[in-house]
Amino acid sequence: MIKWIRICKNRKKGGLGIRDLSKMNIRLMMKWWWKLDNEKGLWQEIVRFKYLKKDSICSVKHKQNDSAIWSDLLKIKEIYLQGRKMIIKDGQRTLFWKDTWLMEKPLGKLFPDLFKMCSQPNISVAFAKQNSVDFSRWLIDDLRDD
């Protein structure tokens, strides 16, 4: 029996050179996420109005009445977010805790204890710059240093 992985390999590597459709589908959906995130157009406006509203890509969640295509896009959202790096600009669209803007990962993943205690998990970088980041309790010295 020949495995699908072997069939999808390049001919020079012993396969038949057939492309893996599931990987191609993921790549296409990643491109849609990128275009939704970075380009302006009619379909982006419609999707933002219908599904994102005031949420960012990081915080949007699956709802019962989502279309099949949107549900499929949400399944690979985390893959897209792993490779996403924000350019801050004015900081209004960049989430302080959830977007990758300062380091190689979002601050919420780098400092999970602080993130659990923050009072406002969806604040923007602009808001954090103008105001202090509030926590639900006093921070011990180690957490304050973070």
Image (spheres, rainbow, N blue to C red):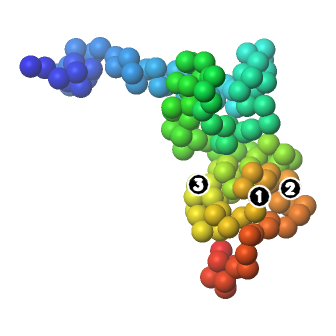
Mark 2 vs 1: CB contact within 8 A? yes
Residue 9 at x, y = what percent? Answer: 25, 23
Residue 111 visible, this orientation: no
**Which amino acid does the dot numbered 1 rest on?**
Gln
Q: Pick whichever, 59 or 24, lies toward us.
A: 59
Q: Distance between the residues labelled 3 and 2?
A: 20 Å
Residue 107 visible, this orientation: yes
Q: How far apart are marks 1 and 3 (CA)?
A: 19 Å
Classify 143 as above or below 107.
Answer: below
Side of 121 where 105 appears, left or right: left
Q: Mark 3, mark 2: which one is toward the viewer?
A: 2
Side of 81 where 102 appears, left or right: right
Q: Mark 1, mark 3: which one is toward the viewer?
A: 1
Residue drawn at (67%, 85%) of the image? 141
- Badge number at residue 61: none
Image quarter of the C terminus: bottom right
Residue 73 at x, y = what percent? Answer: 56, 26
Q: Earlier in the sequence, mark 2 or mark 1?
A: 1
Residue 105 at x, y = what percent? Answer: 58, 54
**Which amino acid does the dot numbered 3 rest on?**
Lys
Which residue position is annotated with label 3?
Answer: 105
- Helix, strand or loop under label 3: loop
Q: In which quarter of the image is residue 32?
A: top right
- Helix, strand or loop under label 2: helix
- Badge number at residue 120: 1
Which residue position is annotated with label 2?
Answer: 127
Q: How far apart are marks 2 and 1 (CA)?
A: 11 Å
Residue 29 at x, y = what percent? Answer: 54, 23
